[in-house]
Amino acid sequence: MRITKLIPCTSALLLLLGISQAKGGLIGFYPFDDTANPLKDESGKGQDLQGGVADPTYSATGGYQGGAYSFNGTQRLISPIDINATVLPTLTMGAWVKTASLVSGLRKVIGQDDGGWDRVIGLDNREGPFRYTGFHGGGVIPGSSAPVNTNDWTFLAATYDETKLQAIIYLDLDASTVGPLVAVTNATTFGSGLETTAIGSIRPDNDSEGWNGLVDNVFFYDEVLSQAQLTAIRDRGKAAILGTGGDDPDLTVSNVPNLQNLPKVPAVHDLAFELKNAGVTKPLKISGVTISGADAAYYTVQQFPTNINALATGTLSVKFDPKGQVGAFSAIATIQSDDPGNPNLQLDISASVIATSTLLGFYSFDDPANPLKDDSGRGHTGQQPADSAAQPVYGATAGASGGGYAFNGSQRLIAPLNINADTVPLLTLGAWVKTASLDVGQRKVLGQDNGGWDRVIGLDGRTTANGGDLPDGTLRYVAFTGVNDNGPTQGSPPPTPTDTNAWTFLAAVYDQLANEVTVYVDLDSATTNDTLQAVTAVTAMEGGTTAVGIGSVTPGETLEGWLGSIDNVFFIGRKLDSAAVTALRNRGPAALLELQSDPALVLPPAPVFGGLSNSSPKTVSLVLSNGGATQPLQIASVRLVGPDAARYTLGTAPQTIAPGAQVTVPVTFDSGGNGGAFQAALELITNDSAERKAVLDLAAVVPIVDIRTSLIGFYPFDDAANPLADKSGHTNDLQTVEGTEPVHVPAGGVTGGAYEFDGGQHLICPININFDVLPLLTMGAWVKTGSLDTGLRKVIGQDDGGWDRVIGLDDRNDVFRYTGFNGGGPVTNTPAPESMDTWTFLAASYNQPARLMTIYVDLDVSSTNDPLVAVSSTTSFGTGLPTTAIGNLRADNTAEGWFGRIDNAFFYSAALTAEQLTALRNGGAAAILGGESSGDTIRITSVTRGANLTIAWTSVAGKTYSIQYTEKLGTAWATIGTQPGLAGTTTYSDTDPARLGKSTGFYRVMLGP
């Protein structure tokens, strides 16, 4: 819930007490409002700031309140306050800030770090994603949020309690609309830092990790303020810190009901919000309350007070009728009053109705005719990998009950379920398993890991990267706990298997709201009178893959593969308590089937459109089903949403689907003759018993006829004066990092210049190739390896630890080869280098709407009559770094550096076809800059003579070609026919007997009639 002004207290006494306590420990406050002395400490402690070294720019009116300082990344101010843990064992510090950049980096607001991860707050991208955070003494605190724009003022604070060895980061990304502060807690291990404190930098003695943006109202307390006290400071700003008054009258919301876990029964909920006039003398008059938002129709204002005396309260009554639906509802109540500072208070009244039936997926493996059937009724049928060697062995009686699958450590199944924390914040998942080995190792039962310790369960022998109670080599059943290398759960005692004959019950409950996971284990599920072993840990989950591997840590590859049997895999969209998990263990499939949804909306599999062969309109009949057994599915609304929704036309959708029935709804996509990626989705609101809102991805990809329009970066390295220049016309020039520059070789390329890399060098490309920025992408280069030794050497990359978009050489999975990452590991079955003397063409195309990528390789480009080797793979990408390295894995260091030469690196905002990339391979830089790849230059690929003469040439769909003839060179050419181009190759046959009867004749193909 978010409101524009919130005082978290129930009486004036508590409010005054909170402010008094805050002021009592104030040891430094810098509001920057005194234009004559903006560095003045307004706390009364005389701790004025010091400047004169690298001063930021002062603005008397540019702050959150009054004045502020603007920092450019190389400036700082110095506070004489010593915030070392030995000097101030309890400390609260913070400020209002506005970032000037959303580019990932290291930028600090307050700091006294001397190189030991000391007390610091700001922006950081280490040990996790780019985010507002702080240090904990041994690294960076995970789990907080990143800035989303450069316009909002953000409230950022941290409390430190040395007696508890605990730090808490508090954050509100938009301090102008205030609700509960986001709080992230972490254990601390602080050493000593510097004795003064920087504002605008990580440390007072230099400008490292300098802030870029505005800073206002910096404060320091010598005590740990509560979340309520910091909320009051965030709400009232300078007035709360200095103990001065606010508006009079002053409308606040002093009590809000819990709207996030409303039961489905009763069907209608009466909600009461306590409103308070925090003004001291004047009465508050309320003139009206209006409700807006996507789900405003489900709310009705019943009553509100029209007059509230000073320091008194009144009740706003709202009726909420979800009309039998469950899930999230979004609405805002705007309260109009005569509060002079906030006449239109916005109260977020969004609610969530919890479902009783929340079985998202259940694989009992009991139907021999269809063992991968989803018994939940939601239609998430399990999938097998395309490689038959990676498919486990099914046995109709091989399970803990009925059928089951046996895995050999290099096999997996795939559950097409998105169990990411932002999609399913509360999740219970598990299975019955039998291990075939007690050896220490990494063997996973279920996983959607994208490189960030995502939601995964199985066996593991590692402790956390930050240390733990168990030594490495302690085999145990675990769950992963999220970013910052938190690693697997531990347990005391650890739940270690001791028998290869017993079936084990393994489950994990993830609570994203509490940042917590609990693993439940029964090493021998044959007996049900024993208590489950439970291991609980703190989590910091991010986004993993959008499907789940069964028998593997990730769905895209068989990594950390299970060795043994698996049965009765389940996914439940609720946080089950210990008793409910025990009931699952005791009763097995029967207990799970009781959680089936009824009614249940079953959507067709995505992609609906995916990659199209041309730009013609296409109609698809969407099959919508009710997977429920007894209850009709009511469709309240269906609409097209997304940036390209206007390109789609939806047919008539029914209002009701009977139990077990299905209907078809036509949807037509028309690109209007344009190429590229189109984003839209079908949003349905129904009475589905698990979730009212469902979204079906309708993304479509249309081939781009002239690929020159999609060229966004090209680096031929041929300009001796500026070899780093981008010749695509987009000015995305490459950048170097001092000490890691490769050597430019002016005549050392496949044509013209090239760069020579020694394994510890790279270039930085400013193009952001993340899948959410460029859903369609093709990147590649001509390369010459300097070594045939096995290893990890990358040509292009932006990986931040999640198997992101990268191409190069890799020897993981025991095969050294040219390859790329697919979001879950390196692509297999691609060729290995054979020579250090030949130039190789290496490229990858990515189609995010279709979740598909293809690696293209030609080991020796000196001959161009051979086809490119093409290997495709499904993808499961998370986000990587926002800039791209040429010559190594990632832009922020030199990991997995290339050894050899690179020439003609290119980037397209399109997924090029094999024919288009073959044209690039054949034509090189000339083709990229406007030759064969665009259709402007035609290459005749074959001429055959029989009864007729047939000509074939490289072509592009949408172009028109003229075929011309002359009997004698040097004379005029005559057009003998025209032919519309096809993608790849077009042919024309001359059947004229007069021409065919000539002793000599010449043909050519030209663009246009």
Image: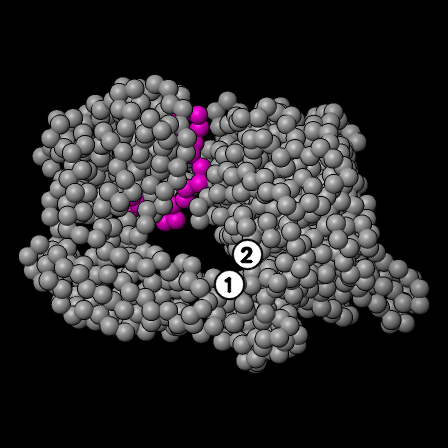
Which is nearer the eye, 835 or 390? 390
Circle 1 sits on which residue?
A: 355
Who's the residue at 59% across and 42% down the image?
531
Q: Residue furthest front?
A: 529
On the picture, is 268 further left or further right than 701? left
Who's the residue at 60% across and 38% down the image?
478
Circle 2 sits on which residue?
A: 573
The amino acid beneath tag 1 is Ala
Crowd band around label 2 with a 10 angstrom C-alpha radius: few (<14), some (14–19), many (20+): many
| Magenta stretch contains residue 233 | no
Quarter location, residue 955:
bottom right
Where residue 59 sits: x, y (%)? Answer: 19, 40
Q: Is residue 380 above or below residue 131?
A: below
The amino acid beneath tag 2 is Gly
Where residue 510 sits: x, y (%)? Answer: 52, 47
What's drawn in magenta, residue-wise?
136-155
| Magenta stretch contains residue 154 | yes
> From the image, which quarter does the N terminus lie in?
bottom left
> From the image, which quarter does the C terminus lie in?
bottom right
Which is nearer the eye, 102 or 435? 435
On the picture, is 883 further left or further right than 63? right
Crowd band around label 1 with a 10 angstrom C-alpha radius: few (<14), some (14–19), many (20+): many
Find out whether the residues at labels 2 and 1 contact each other: C-beta distance under 8 Å: yes
State the mark number for residue 166: none
Where residue 965 sits: x, y (%)? Answer: 79, 64
How is the protein colored in the picture?
one colour
